[in-house]
């Protein structure tokens, strides 16, 4: 089902580092450009480095509204991006997570590290428990980056640790063409 944009806010989860493959940066740019050209607002982790910085700067370049959410204590590690349109500085990671869930209308996970894995679990748990409703979650499985996570979530269903409808909460796409069917 394609999402209709009425100033829809898309949270993009991704790495605060660039990763080992130049393609990670390229896909972050392409996904962000596509969303911006279709007038979606961007919500992201608030940093100015790594793929997060690429997402923010690409969105700003494409004249999208950019909201960052970052805990104050991360400023020494990730450098808070001060040129974005809206910045929420939280005291804790828990506050940051709650803000992501409340401000965002849908979510996309691009390549990232431990924080991105945690954000994937956050959104899927919130959907499963009904904390958030009617929000889409896309795992952008660029070059099978997330295949192990996807397989693990399938395993929890087959092993009886989640209801069968749990798989309805995850949309997997691997390229921009597949993303266009959603947004």
Image (cartoon, helix red, strand yellow):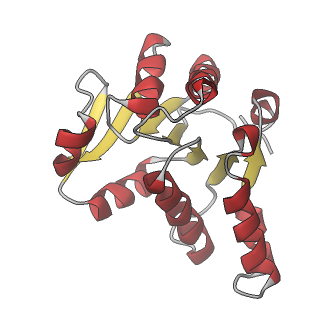
Q: Image quarter for residue 8?
A: top right
Q: Is 165 or 150 nearer to us in this picture?
A: 150
Q: Is 48 or 124 nearer to us in this picture?
A: 48
Whether residue 39 is visible: no
* Viewport quadrant of the N terminus: top right
* Viewport quadrant of the C terminus: top right
Tell me residue 165's x, y (percent). 78, 73
Give the residue displayed 64% in from the left and 58% down from the top: 134
Whether residue 168 is visible: yes
Furthest residue in direction front, as rendered: 20
Q: Is 24 or 161 nearer to us in this picture?
A: 24
Q: Image quarter for residue 156?
A: bottom right
Give the residue displayed 67% in from the left and 51% down from the top: 146
Tell me residue 173's x, y (percent). 77, 43
Tell me residue 66's x, y (percent). 40, 28
Give the residue displayed 38% in from the left and 42% down from the top: 45
Tell me residue 25's x, y (percent). 55, 25
């Amino acid at each position: 089902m394609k999402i209709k944009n009425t100033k829809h806010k898309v949270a993009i989860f991704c790495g605060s580092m660039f990763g080992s493959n130049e393609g990670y940066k390229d896909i972050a740019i392409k996904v962000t450009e596509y969303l911006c050209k279709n007038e979606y607002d961007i919500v992201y982790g608030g940093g100015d480095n790594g793929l997060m910085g690429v997402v923010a700067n690409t969105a700003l370049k494409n004249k999208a509204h950019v909201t960052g959410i970052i805990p104050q204590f991360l400023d020494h590690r990730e450098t808070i991006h001060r040129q974005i349109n809206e910045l929420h500085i939280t005291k804790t990671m828990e506050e940051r997570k709650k803000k992501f869930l409340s401000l965002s209308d849908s979510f996309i996970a691009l390549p990232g590290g431990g924080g991105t894995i945690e954000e994937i679990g956050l959104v899927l748990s919130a959907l499963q428990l009904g904390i958030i409703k009617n929000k889409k979650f896309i795992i952008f499985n660029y070059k099978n980056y997330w295949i192990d996570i996807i397989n693990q979530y399938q395993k929890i269903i087959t092993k009886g640790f989640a209801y069968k409808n749990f798989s309805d909460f995850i949309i997997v796409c691997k390229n921009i063409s597949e993303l266009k069917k959603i947004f």
